[in-house]
Image: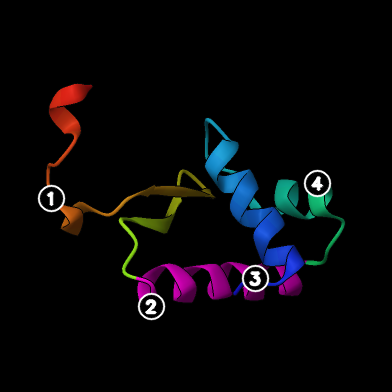
Amino acid sequence: MLDQLARQIEALLIASEEPLDMGRICEITGCGTESAEQAIGRIEEELAAGGHSVQVVQLAGGYRIVTDPGAGPCGLPAF
């Protein structure tokens, strides 16, 4: 189970329409860079361990939660 900071960052990464850079994550959550990096690491571990179909990626200088390419094409025809 994720701690409060990791849950906040996870929610931000899901809700954001574009990648969030570390500065913005820290600004919104009020945490420092090291705490945010550690929280992102915990999110990555939790998603990987739980067999989720999403993952955290670094993209365009920021972070996003995206679908895992290994999950296959299921659901894509609906879009």
Picture quarter containing residue 5?
A: bottom right
54 in magenta:
no
Q: Is residue 18 left or right of residue 31?
A: left
Q: Residues within 10 Å of mark 2 (few under 14, many from 20)?
A: few
Mark 3 and mark 1 lie on one chain; the one further toward the N terminus is 3
Picture quarter containing residue 12?
A: top right
Q: Which residue is mark 4?
A: 28
Q: What's the amino acid at mark 3?
A: Ala
Q: Name which residue lies at 87% across and 56% down.
A: 30
Give the residues drawn in magenta, as a range.
33-50
Looking at the rendered image, the disc whose residue lies closer to the viewer, 3 or 1, is 1
Q: What's the amino acid at mark 4?
A: Ile
Q: Which residue is mark 2?
A: 49
Q: What's the amino acid at mark 1?
A: Gly
Looking at the rendered image, the disc whose residue lies closer to the viewer, 3 or 2, is 2
Element type where label 1 sits in the image: loop
Element type where label 2 sits in the image: helix
Looking at the rendered image, the disc whose residue lies closer to the viewer, 4 or 1, is 1
Coordinates of residue 56 in the picture (x, y in percent): 44, 58
Q: What's the amino acid at mark 2?
A: Ala
Mark 2 and mark 4 lie on one chain; the one further toward the N terminus is 4
